[in-house]
Image (cartoon, rainbow, N blue to C red):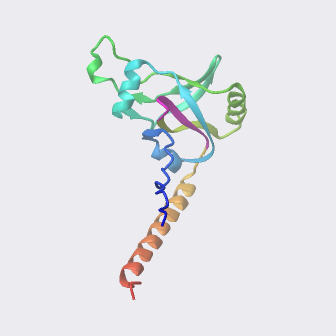
Amino acid sequence: MSEKPKVPPPKKRDTGEKLIVANKRASFDFHLEKRFEAGIVLLGSEVKSCRQGGVQLVDAYATFERDGLYLQKANIGEYKQAGPYQNHVPIRRRKLLLHKREIAELREASERSGYTLIPVRLYFKAGKVKLELALARGKTKGDKRVSAAEKDMKRNVQAAVRRERKTHSFDD
């Protein structure tokens, strides 16, 4: 009798992405329409601070200037081990790296009334820091109430399903 060779289970694909920070406030305050992945120009102490998770994107946004696209008001905390002379300024503008056609598309779209560019999340991808940027349109108070009500409704439905599964055992 010949034995079949054992085949190892398929490995999960590692996307190589490690989340640094997500801007949870963005989806609450804005309708996120289209997303772009951008590189970001950082100093060495900023990258090390990102590895420690000292980043906040809550008030950040992207703007166009003469020579490109820049991230404004993103707070990357100081790297503790760097000391006072090798450290960086926590809140400064940082250049974003995109293809020319993406920059042109974003510039055209952001010039429309009511649209802005909001950072959604910052993450490592293959050892490089990347920023997910979304073309966003602001929500009104009514829109925020509707999305909060939908979120509550989904949570209540999921809780009811869990309760129902708990009371009915399917082991018969």
Measured along the vertical axis of the image, is residue 101 above or below residue 27? Answer: above
Quadrant of the image occupied by residue 44:
top left
48 or 136, nearer to the observer: 48
Is 133 within the magenta? yes
Task: Tell me the quarter of the picture where residue 49 sits.
Answer: top left
Query: What residue is drawn where x is 58% and y is 31%?
Result: 38
Q: Is residue 77 left or right of residue 107?
A: left
Percent across and percent down for residue 40 are: 52, 25
Q: How many discs mark residues in the rendered view?
A: 0
**Left or right for 76, reference 96:** left
Res. 63 visible in picture: yes
Q: Residue at x 47, y 73 (%)?
A: 157
Q: Is residue 131 magenta?
A: yes
In the image: residue 65, left or right of residue 11: right
Give the residues in magenta: 124-136
Q: Is residue 31 above or below residue 154?
A: above
Nearer to us in this view, 126 or 80: 126
What is the quadrant of residue 156 in the picture? Answer: bottom left
- Regarding residue 90, the answer to whether it shows in the image is no
Q: Would you place residue 158 above or below residue 98 in this image?
A: below
| Residue reaching furthest to the top | 85
Tell whether 73 sits left or right of 32.
Answer: left
Q: Residue at x 48, y 55 (%)?
A: 7
**Extreme-front residue of the structure:** 1
Position of residue 95 measured from the top left corner of the image (x, y, whole percent): 55, 22
Residue 124 placed where, x, y %? Answer: 46, 34
